[in-house]
Image (tube, grey):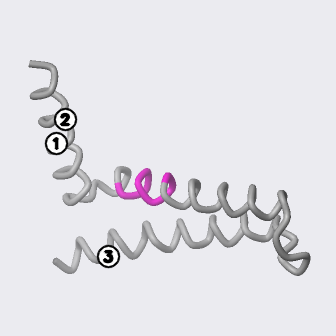
Amino acid sequence: ILLSALRALVASAVMGAAVYGIALLGQWEQGTSLRNIAVLGLTVISGVLIFFVMAYVLRSPELTHLLSMVKQRLGRGRA
């Protein structure tokens, strides 16, 4: 369990650093603007992608299990 938690911690730290850097592109003091909405969307999408890529690189057993379930589900849907 400790190793799994460490993997999640590393993936989260990398994601957090990347998301923070992307969020700096926003001009948040201006309030709601098209730029800020785009930066927010990019930040959220990037965060999700980076976390999953890091979990894959770190060979997270939870992600491996999730991917096998998705592949199994998609395989059944085609039959």
Q: Secondary structure at mark 2?
A: helix
Residue 71's label in the rendered image is: 2
Element marked by disc 1: helix
Q: Where is residue 58 drawn, in percent x and y?
A: 34, 57
User: Upstream in the sequence, badge 3 or badge 1?
Assistant: 3
Using residue 15 as the reference point, say whether residue 26 is left or right of it.
right
Q: Return the x and y of residue 45 as percentages of the image width and height.
A: 56, 54
Query: Residue 28: image x %, image y %?
Result: 83, 76
Q: Position of residue 12 (x, y in %)?
A: 46, 71
| Amino acid carrying mark 3 in the image | Leu
Is residue 53 within the magenta segment? yes
- Of badges 3 and 1, the one in the foreground is 1
Question: Image check: 26 left or right of 74?
Answer: right
Instruction: Measure the alpha-carbon separation of dots 1 and 2.
Output: 5 Å
Dot 3: within a 10 Å radius of its alpha carbon, few (fewer than 14), some, or many (20 or more) residues? few
Q: Which residues are magenta?
A: 49-55
At x 36%, y 57%, the residue is 55
Residue 69, compared with residue 25, is above or below; it is above
Q: Secondary structure at mark 3?
A: helix
Does 41 lie within the magenta span?
A: no
Q: Are marks 1 and 2 in contact (CB under 8 Å)?
A: yes
- Mark 3 highlights which residue? 6
| Residue at image mark 1 | 68
